[in-house]
Amino acid sequence: MDISSELQVIKPIITIYSNKFLSIENYVNIVEFDTNLIRVKTKEKIVKITGDKLVLKYINEDEIGIKGIINSLEFTD
């Protein structure tokens, strides 16, 4: 079954579990990576995650998982 492009979800979906883990669906690439800062480009904005001991738990073509102590999440251009 073909799904109309208007119905397809292309917006980023961010799920946060407490301040210890988050996942980002529909990302484009990783712009910057450090144990205190990760910036991920999505089709709309750049998601800036700041914290401590941040690591990439998993990464695949649709989703990225980030583990660590998450202090803030910000959308930038």
Image (cartoon, grey):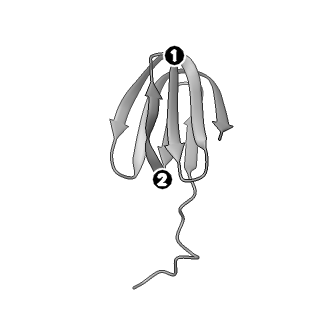
Q: Position of residue 61 (x, y in %)?
A: 34, 51
The answer to whether residue 31 shows anywhere in this view is: yes
Res 50 quadrant in image = top right
Question: Extreme bottom residue here?
Answer: 1
Q: How many marks?
A: 2
Q: Which of disc 1 and disc 2 is earlier in sequence?
A: 2
Q: Is residue 55 above or below residue 3?
A: above
* Secondary-structure class at tag 1: loop
Q: Residues within 10 Å of mark 2 (few under 14, many from 20)?
A: some
Q: Position of residue 55 (x, y in %)?
A: 40, 23
- The residue nearer to you, when weighing 29 against 63, is 29
Q: Residue at x 57, y 44 (%)?
A: 14
Q: Residue at x 45, y 16 (%)?
A: 35
Q: Position of residue 6 (x, y in %)?
A: 58, 76
**Quarter of the picture holding the C terminus:** top right
Q: Is residue 39 above or below residue 50?
A: below
**Quarter of the picture holding the N terminus:** bottom left
* Secondary-structure class at tag 2: loop
- The residue nearer to you, when weighing 67 against 49, is 49
Q: Which residue is mark 1?
A: 36
- The residue nearer to you, when weighing 26 against 43, is 43
* Cβ atoms at labels 2 and 1 below 8 Å apart: no
- Give the alpha-carbon distance from disc 2 to disc 1, as whole Å: 23 Å
Q: Which residue is mark 2?
A: 26
Amino acid type, callout 1: Asn
Q: Residue at x 34, y 40 (%)?
A: 59
Amino acid type, callout 2: Asn
